[in-house]
Image (cartoon, rainbow, N blue to C red):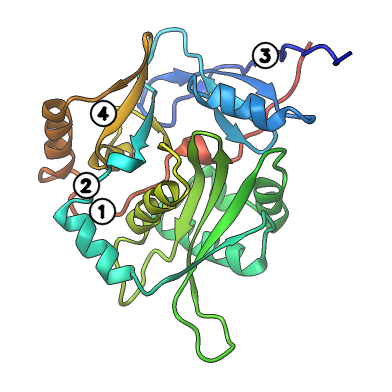
Amino acid sequence: MSAPIRFPRFFVTAPSPCPYLPGRTERKVFTELKGEAADELNEALGRIGFRRSQTVAYRPSCLDCQACISVRVVADEFRPSSTQKRNIKRNRDLVATECRPWATAEQFELLQRYLAVRHPGGGMTHMEESDFADMVEHSPVSSYMIEYREPGVGSQQGRLVGACLTDFQGDGLSMIYSFYEPEHEARSGLGNYIILDHMRRARDRELPYVYLGYWVEGSERMQYKVRYRPLERLTRNGWERVSDSEQKRLIAAATAPGGQRDREALPSKDGEPSRYRMVG
């Protein structure tokens, strides 16, 4: 006789300032991921808009706002734009390695450089090495740290220039958090290259999707996500594809003067480690 399936208990955080839209507050609903069924639960919740942070799956649950929209790219149908093709060519010599989720000092030093330039004053800039280890290693699901290095010399490893904590799900790859060398003297577009590499990895594994987390129209640092086509978004009626005409409009807005034409893709805050407390 099999053991009964336990329905997860959900909790709600207290309201806090919204990291995406000034003047608004955010609230999240979350549950703990644990036990032998953690992978299955994480995948099921991912399909309805949840994201993972360490041992917790969460999604926005704001009372007066639904601006956060889960998005994913259809990997098999993805075709890089001319700009993305140039990015792939420019960085194709990078050596990518899937590593077990084990934090290293080298990764942490790269993260610190990244945060100091890309997110100065952000909450993660105060992260200590032990916090980073918790972020990477406290995973109850199938996850990897994918490292991106420049070519080495002989048996010596090359310079670490990028990394991404990634969950491997039955229907795709979920990019939890990525970071990279923010002021590389000879390379640009490293953040975007990491996303492009995940498209390739999903196709190689015959996985249909790459999950990019939440997209918020009006939040400048989230607009890079609309550049990946075809894009699907989660609605009240399930996952729906963004039409070509609408996506062209969104891309035009994102690349217009004053937008993010020349800015690097910034991982959205939904990938940052958060403190959740089980109550009740």
Residue 88 at x, y percent in the picture: 28, 63
Per the image, the residue denoted by label 4 is 218
Between disc 1 and disc 3, the foreground one is 3
Assign a secondary structure to mark 4: loop
Q: Does 126 sit above or below residue 57?
A: below
Q: Neighbour class for label 1 at 10 Å: few (<14), some, many (≥20)?
A: few
Q: CA distance from mark 4 to mark 1?
A: 16 Å
Q: Does 20 sit above or below residue 163?
A: above
Say which residue appears at 61% left-offset and 52% top-offset: 144
Question: Residue 155 is drawn in which quadrant?
Answer: bottom right
Per the image, the residue denoted by label 3 is 10
Q: State if disc 4 and disc 3 touch (CB < 8 Å).
A: no
Label whose residue precedes the other's in the sequence (4 or 2): 4
The type of residue carrying mark 2 is Gln
Label whose residue precedes the other's in the sequence (4 or 1): 4
Q: Does 3 sit above or below residue 224?
A: above
Label whose residue precedes the other's in the sequence (3 or 4): 3
Q: CA distance from mark 4 to mark 2?
A: 12 Å
The type of residue carrying mark 3 is Phe
Q: Neighbour class for label 2 at 10 Å: few (<14), some, many (≥20)?
A: some
Image quarter in which the N terminus is found: top right
The type of residue carrying mark 4 is Gly
Residue 232 at x, y percent in the picture: 32, 27
The type of residue carrying mark 1 is Arg
Per the image, the residue denoted by label 2 is 260
Per the image, the residue denoted by label 1 is 263
Q: State if disc 2 and disc 3 touch (CB < 8 Å).
A: no
Q: State if disc 2 and disc 1 touch (CB < 8 Å).
A: yes
Choose between 245 and 270: the one closer to the eye.
245
Label whose residue precedes the other's in the sequence (3 or 2): 3
Choose between 133 and 240: the one closer to the eye.
240
Image quarter in which the C terminus is found: top right
